[in-house]
């Protein structure tokens, strides 16, 4: 094969990866002792010899070829240094020959077909190697890493629009939590501006792990706390709760509707965009970091919890009045009540009350058994009151007769 010790022109070569195999590797990459990478393919085979094409490439070019950004045909025909080497290895003891060729002059028949790709997941960004907790104590800043597993991505790249939305939404959540904890939501002025500036995060790096972005807070005080420490602690806590309805509702209720609204926007920036997301937080006053992974299903569940209306109160009562409207098809009712029958009560008709509404006479006097509920929308804090008819009885009759 082409890594035959008789091939001396490129120095000592070591196989990196094999991409196609037929009795032996026929498409592969190799690297020499000084780090030059070659993509190699079998171009011709006769009874007397086999010919191989070698194209040198930079690390960056190799990563793009390996991950399917550049097809194999272009990799050879559009060589970075415009040269492809043809190496002929005789089956006899005759010497190996190497001929440099102008890449653009190559006969297409000796090259892989246009549109043929290597499609392998490839790290195109460096990894964050240092422990986040050690780095946090070293630089005396809170550090937060958000990593996203993005579907159908072979390189460590993220769509600009997605990343912009995530960065903005993450900062808005942290700022809203900081305001909530300091009791400043809804207030204005220099103190609020100062607090927001102090809790603002800076992007200090991007790295591999599908796609990973690292944030840093401002400097810590003597106790190892920054202006963002408590807000980041709460942010990570929300992610840890996931989509569990009762704890999530309780936590967001404690932090006020503004936080729920901004957290909902953060979750929406991930929804249908990521297969999973991972958050790692480290602060200078702790020995260990906090890590949480949320799946796409968890993101969707949390969105559902926040978007839903949650019952704050529920009570039943009986009222008497004249029936001013009822619809069997829409399942609604209206009743005039009060001393002069000028007050209006209306709402939905429960399934169990449909039989009592069917056949009811407009303007007749009825006693209605109703349920009043108050619900709250987590993302806005809006309280909504509803009335549901549970039963309708003509005045003078006993219910059930």
Image (cartoon, rainbow, N blue to C red):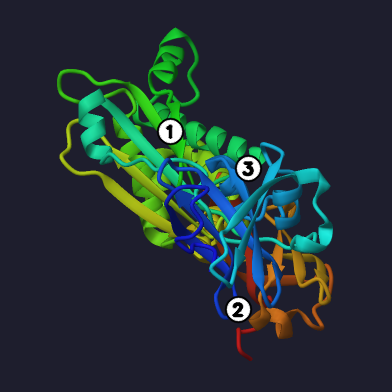
Q: Residue 250 at x, y = what percent?
A: 38, 51
From the image, state whether disc 1 or disc 2 is nearer to you: 2
Query: Which corner quadrant of the image does residue 154 belong to?
Result: bottom right
Q: What label sits on residue 381 in the rendered view? A: none
Which residue is farthest front? 94
Q: Label 3's element? A: helix
Q: Looking at the image, can residue 46 be seen? A: yes
Q: Is residue 228 above or below residue 82?
A: above
Which residue is farthest top? 190
Q: What label sits on residue 162 in the rendered view? A: 3
Q: Is residue 44 above or below residue 303?
A: below
CA gap between label 1 and label 3 equals 18 Å
Which residue in the protein does label 2 denote? 22
Which residue in the protein does label 1 denote? 174
87 lies left or right of 176: right
Q: Residue 352 at x, y = what percent?
A: 64, 82
Question: Which mark sits nearer the N-terminus, 2 or 3?
Answer: 2
Mark 1 and mark 3 residues within 8 Å of each other at the beta carbon: no
Mark 1 and mark 2 residues within 8 Å of each other at the beta carbon: no
Question: Which mark sits nearer the N-terminus, 1 or 2?
Answer: 2
CA gap between label 2 and label 3 equals 42 Å
CA gap between label 1 and label 2 equals 56 Å
Q: Looking at the image, can residue 382 be seen? A: no
User: Label 1: how many residues lie within 10 Å, few (<14), some (14-19) or many (20+)?
Assistant: many
Q: Residue at x 41, y 62 (%)?
A: 244
């Amino acid at each position: 094969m082409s890594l035959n010790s008789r091939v001396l022109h490129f120095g000592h070569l070591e196989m990196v990866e094999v991409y196609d195999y037929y009795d032996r590797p026929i498409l592969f990459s190799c690297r020499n002792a000084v780090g030059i990478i070659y993509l190699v393919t079998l171009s011709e085979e006769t009874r007397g010899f086999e010919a191989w094409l070698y194209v040198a490439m930079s690390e960056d070019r190799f990563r793009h070829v390996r991950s399917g950004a550049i097809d194999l045909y272009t990799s050879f025909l559009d060589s970075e240094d415009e040269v492809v080497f043809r190496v002929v290895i005789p089956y006899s003891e005759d010497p190996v020959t190497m001929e440099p060729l102008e890449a653009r002059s190559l006969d297409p028949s000796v090259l892989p077909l246009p549109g043929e790709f290597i499609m392998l997941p490839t790290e195109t960004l460096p990894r964050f190697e240092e422990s986040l907790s050690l780095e946090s104590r070293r630089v005396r800043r809170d550090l937060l890493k958000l990593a996203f597993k993005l579907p159908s991505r072979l390189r460590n790249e993220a769509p600009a629009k997605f990343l912009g939305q995530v960065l903005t939404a993450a900062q808005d959540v942290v700022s809203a939590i900081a305001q909530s904890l300091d009791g400043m939501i809804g207030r204005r002025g220099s103190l609020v501006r100062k607090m927001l500036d102090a809790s603002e995060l800076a992007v200090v790096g991007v790295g591999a792990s599908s796609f990973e972005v690292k944030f840093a807070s401002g400097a810590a005080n003597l106790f190892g706390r920054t202006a963002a420490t408590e807000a980041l602690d709460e942010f990570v806590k929300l992610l840890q709760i996931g989509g569990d309805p009762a704890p999530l509702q309780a936590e967001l209720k404690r932090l006020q509707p503004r936080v729920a609204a901004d957290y909902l926007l953060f979750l929406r920036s991930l929804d249908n965009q990521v297969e999973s997301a991972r958050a790692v937080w480290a602060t200078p006053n702790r020995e260990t970091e906090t890590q949480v992974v949320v799946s796409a299903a968890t993101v969707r569940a949390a969105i559902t919890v926040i978007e839903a209306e949650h019952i704050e109160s529920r009570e039943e009562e009986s009222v008497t009045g004249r029936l001013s409207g009822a619809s069997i098809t829409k399942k609604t009712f209206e009743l005039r009540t009060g001393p002069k029958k000028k007050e209006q009560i209306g709402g939905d008709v429960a399934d169990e009350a449909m039989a009592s509404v069917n056949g009811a006479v407009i303007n007749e006097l009825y006693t209605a058994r109703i349920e009043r509920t108050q619900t709250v929308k987590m993302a806005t804090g809006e309280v909504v009151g509803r009335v549901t008819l549970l039963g309708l009885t003509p005045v003078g009759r006993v219910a059930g007769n």
